[in-house]
């Protein structure tokens, strides 16, 4: 998905105009904000966000033995 978003953004950087963008997954349509495609890579911020939420998901707070994944 990140690759496809990068392609849309690169189209903008080459002077193309995007009128409408949709993400279609298993028949569900999600409209994407075209102003988000400004020529900058989209995949890098998405990868950074993924890294941050994974870090939060797998890092319990100090001394929290009730944390759901503490025993892993």
Image (cartoon, helix red, strand yellow):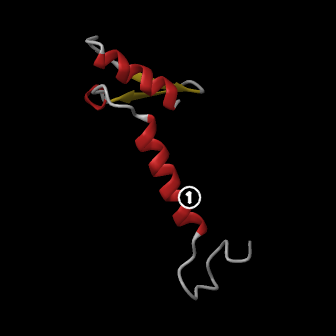
Please tell me which residue is depicted at 56% across the width and 58% down the height of the picture: 54
x, y percent for residue 11: 35, 15
x, y percent for residue 4: 48, 23
- Judged from the image, the secondary structure of the residue bearing numbered disc 1 is helix
Residue furthest to the right: 72
Please tell me which residue is depicted at 44% across the width and 27% down the height of the picture: 5
Residue furthest to the top: 16
Residue furthest to the bottom: 63
Q: Which residue is mark 1?
A: 54
Q: Residues within 10 Å of mark 1 (few under 14, many from 20)?
A: few
Up-down relation of residue 27 to residue 70 (above or below): above
x, y percent for residue 70: 67, 77
Query: Quick one: quadrant of the C terminus?
Result: bottom right
Please tell me which residue is depicted at 30% across the width and 13% down the height of the picture: 14
Horizontally, residue 41 falls left or right of residue 24, namely left
Is 11 or 65 nearer to us in this picture? 11
Up-down relation of residue 9 to residue 49 (above or below): above
Horizontally, residue 22 falls left or right of residue 54, namely left
Please tell me which residue is depicted at 45% across the width and 49% down the height of the picture: 48
Is 30 or 36 nearer to us in this picture? 36
Up-down relation of residue 15 to residue 46 (above or below): above
Horizontally, residue 28 falls left or right of residue 9, namely right
Is 50 or 30 nearer to us in this picture? 50
């Amino acid at each position: 998905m990140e690759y496809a978003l990068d392609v849309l953004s690169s189209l903008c950087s080459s002077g193309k105009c995007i009128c409408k963008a949709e993400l279609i997954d298993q028949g569900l349509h999600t409209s994407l904000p075209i102003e988000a495609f400004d020529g900058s890579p989209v995949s890098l911020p998405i990868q950074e966000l993924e890294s941050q939420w994974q870090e939060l998901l797998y890092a319990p707070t100090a001394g929290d033995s009730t944390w759901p994944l503490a025993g892993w």
